[in-house]
Amino acid sequence: MTETSSNPARGGAQPGRIGIGLELDATHLKILEVLRENGRISVAALAERVGISRANAYTRFEALRADGAIRRFTAEIDHVRAGLGITALIFVTVRQQMWRQFRAELAAMPEVEYCAITTGQHDAMIQVRMADVAAVHAMVTERLAGIPAVKATETVFILDEVIRRPYVLPGGRAVRRAARRTAPEPTGPAGSGSAAGPGGEVPLGKMRFVGAAEGRGRLQRDG
């Protein structure tokens, strides 16, 4: 599972759905959870971790990847060992008529790990990883300050990254709803043909078949 998917995510897709028309259920989410821990896991090991057959695991994995729910696979490195021990957030105020120039200049900076347009006091947040504080200072005062599109900056150094996940997954109610979608449908006593749940409640959209004798008995009692 080390290939890089070239299928872009469909912009019009509904969140929580995949293109083949199936909603992401609890099994899909469990697959994504396992892949978050180890993207190179084999299909056989993935199936064992999720508790499904190997064929089912392969089919679901390929559906997620082909649809764009899994966009790509990449490596996660130790930034300190790579010589980038300093992480900083740089909040930028951008001259509103010069956004195109701002984006183009940032794209040419390999130190920039992440950039997002934000609400609030500033217009954008940049995350950089560099060798030391002096390198961050030089980038802010010499390179960013030299971009005409940049009006002002504010730099915050990260002391410790407490939690950093490759991605997050739905939790709470979303997971419980997904689990209900994958739960086996309740069945009545053998031979009754009933799809009613506990207490005789019939799930929405289901039909409960009643034998003729039972139906006549009910009519007599209700009458």
Image: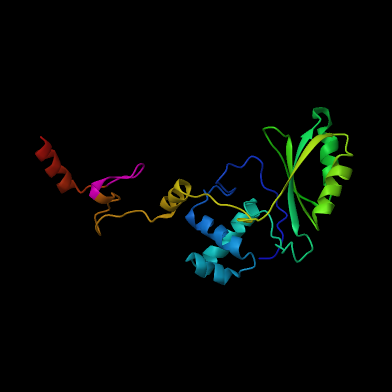
Q: Tell me how the rendering is colored.
A: rainbow
Q: Position of residue 147 (x, y in %)?
A: 88, 38
Vertical comparison of 91 with 98: above or below: below
Vertical comparison of 15 with 169: above or below: above
Q: Total marks drawn? A: 0
Q: Nearer the viewer, residue 4 or 112?
A: 112
Vertical comparison of 43 with 144: above or below: below
Q: Which residues are magenta?
A: 199-208
Q: Nearer the viewer, residue 193 or 156?
A: 156
State whether residue 108 appears in this view: no
Residue appearing at x 84%, y 31% in the figure: 98
Q: For this view, does 181 lie left or right of residue 194?
A: right
Q: Nearer the viewer, residue 100 or 200?
A: 100
State whether residue 195 appears in this view: yes
Farthest top residue in view: 97
Q: Position of residue 41 (x, y in %)?
A: 61, 69
Asked if the stretch drawn in magenta spans residue 206, the answer is yes
Q: Quadrant of the C terminus?
A: top left
Q: Nearer the viewer, residue 7 or 46?
A: 46
Residue appearing at x 57%, y 58% in the figure: 32
Q: Position of residue 80 (x, y in %)?
A: 74, 63
Q: Main secondary structure of the magenta part?
A: loop
Q: For this view, does 196 lie left or right of residue 45?
A: left
The image quadrant that residue 33 belongs to is bottom right
Asked if the stretch drawn in magenta spans residue 36, the answer is no
Q: Position of residue 204 (x, y in %)?
A: 35, 42
Q: For this view, does 222 lie left or right of residue 42?
A: left
Q: Quadrant of the N terminus?
A: bottom right
Q: For this view, does 176 lie left or right of residue 148?
A: left
The image quadrant that residue 202 belongs to is top left
The image quadrant that residue 57 belongs to is bottom right
